Image (tube, rainbow, N blue to C red):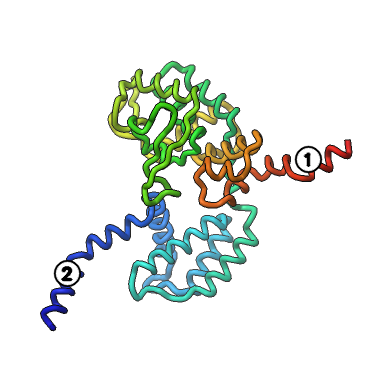
Amino acid sequence: MENALEKQRTSISELRPQIENLIQSSISANTKKAYQRALQGIENWLPAGEPLSDHLLAAYLTELHEKGKSPSTISQVVAAVKWQMKHQPGADFPLPTTYATLAGIRRDGKARGRGQVDGMIWQDVERVCILAETDGTLAGLRDSAMIRLMSDCLLRISEVVAVNAGDLKERTLSVQASKSDQEGRGESLYVCDRTRDILTKYKEMGSIQEGPMFRQIRRGGHIQENRLHDHSARRIVQKRASDAGVVGFISGHSLRVGSAMSLASAGATVVDMQVAGRWKSSQMPAHYAKAELAERGAIARFKDGKMQ
């Protein structure tokens, strides 16, 4: 009996690296980085030698709130702690004070939320991309192709930098895995005619037949084999938008937000937007396009017309 138990312990011990790898793979790389940053922030804040507790975590959240952090950012801190506790046996403890504090933060700081990011609607995207294309460089074509593809397919930064040449079919883009598709089932997203034209020109000029689609380009137009990093793609979106005179707080997420807004203005339903952006619920597209949806609401359709 003892030998059997010892063999079982040995087997479990040998499996620990594989178990740890599977746990690490249970969330996306970007989420993992965000959690690591959040946990490092807590560690730096904690008094030396003091273990984290419910009351200390609530105090840390309160301090973040007083510094002007958004509820979504603060909620991510709690999610990081819960994820860490879940995968560290014996580290779990109840969080009643933390949850009550977070509820108050969400009410008090609701105006600080995701709405800080301004959307790049389709007209903005067209202006930005035409300007990028007219500089006559490979970088200009790459940037236009990338921005157009993000707008068409409502891609996240992490998704667009992961695109390979082989992912583009005749009229669709195959996305193998994403934040909303952690299991990697894959999805096919429609790519507009103009975007396909620019992608073709970029691939021909850069001699790209396989491998990463959006690559680093050195001075003189020398294209590299390495794919763009997330932060490089984000800077490209911000710089190209600034060059074209697009105002507001622009980030890589602005293209998803802007496409949701444009879809709403064109008459798409919240469900249409949810499907296009691969959101798990209708809450986020409805939030992003709330102004456009209000203009199509019952008051706009019935009362305003009657009072003319």
Q: Secondary structure at mark 1?
A: helix
Query: Is any part of residue 178 visible from this angle?
Result: yes
Q: Which residue has dot 2 on it?
A: 11
Q: Position of residue 18 (x, y in %)?
A: 23, 60
Residue at 60% across, 28% down: 123
**Mark before the other along the chain sequence, 2 or 1:** 2
218 above or below 286? above
Residue at 43% across, 58% down: 38
Pick the quarter of the image with the C terminus.
Answer: top right
The quarter of the displayed image where residue 139 is located: top left
* The label number, if any, that marks residue 191 in the structure image: none
Q: Out of 220 and 226, give the one closest to the viewer.
A: 226
Pick the quarter of the image with the N terminus.
Answer: bottom left
Q: Position of residue 50 (x, y in %)?
A: 40, 74
Q: Which residue has dot 1 on it?
A: 301
Q: Out of 125 and 248, give the one closest to the viewer.
A: 125
Do tag 2 and tag 1 residues touch (Cβ < 8 Å)? no
The residue mark sitting in front, 2 or 1, is: 1
User: As shown in the figure, which amino acid type bears the numbered disc 1?
Assistant: Arg
Q: Secondary structure at mark 2?
A: helix
Q: Position of residue 214 (x, y in %)?
A: 37, 31
214 above or below 29? above
Q: Position of residue 286 (x, y in %)?
A: 62, 47
Label 1 packing within 10 angstroms: few (<14), some (14-19), many (20+): few
User: As shown in the figure, which amino acid type bears the numbered disc 2?
Assistant: Ser
